[in-house]
Amino acid sequence: MKTADDVKDAFAGLVGVDKDTAFKGIINGMSPKDRKKALATTKSVIGDIPPETRHTLWLIVILGFVIVLVGSFAILASSLFFKPPEGATSSQLMLTVFTTVVGFLAGLFSPSPVDRTSGGTE
């Protein structure tokens, strides 16, 4: 029976794309229980994303959508008072952008129907 060190040495001897293929083959050849345990071990070795990084990424995403929301609202509001130049973006397109962004942001803040533990008050 091979030990973990034997498998590690054999894996280290592979070159290039062979490691990717071998790893996928090993994972796909495992039973669901062993696969879950192996992936949990891999996650513990690699680690989670630090909360500060996750927070920064969420801020970037939210701020990007808020900028689009404010910009599309400003264009919609200005189209009520000023006639858009010939060939400009139509107000209907901006209304679509506005409602899409509002829907996206509302979806982020609404509680998940699947996750019954959060209740949406986190």
Image (cartoon, rainbow, N blue to C red):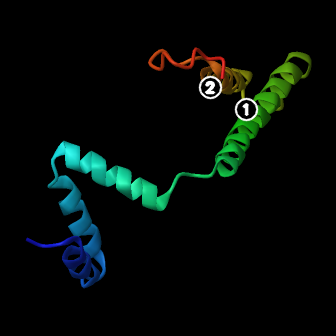
Q: Nearer the viewer, residue 109 or 12?
A: 12
Q: Is residue 79 left or right of residue 99?
A: right
Q: Nearer the viewer, residue 114 or 78?
A: 114
Label 1: few (<14), some or many (≥20) within 10 Å?
few
Secondary structure found at label 1: loop
| Sooner in the amino-acid sequence: mark 2 or mark 1 | 1
Residue 85: percent from left, percent from top: 83, 32
Q: Is residue 72 above or below residue 33?
A: above
Under mark 1, the amino acid is Thr
For residue 43, the mark is none
Name the residue: 51% across, 18% down: 117
Cα–Cα gap, marks 2 and 1: 28 Å
Q: Is residue 92 above or below residue 37?
A: above
Q: Is residue 31 above or below residue 90?
A: below
Residue identified by numbered label 1: 89
Label 2: few (<14), some or many (≥20) within 10 Å?
few
Secondary structure found at label 2: helix
Quadrant holding the C terminus: top right
Under mark 2, the amino acid is Leu
Name the residue: 44% across, 61% down: 45
Name the residue: 86% across, 20% down: 77
Residue 60: percent from left, percent from top: 72, 44
Residue identified by numbered label 2: 108
Q: Is residue 64 left or right of residue 4?
A: right
Residue 108: percent from left, percent from top: 62, 26
Q: Is residue 105 left or right of residue 37?
A: right
* Numbered disc total: 2
Q: Nearer the viewer, residue 56 or 84?
A: 56
Quadrant holding the N terminus: bottom left
Location of residue 29 by image quarter: bottom left
Residue 83 appears in the picture as rendered: no
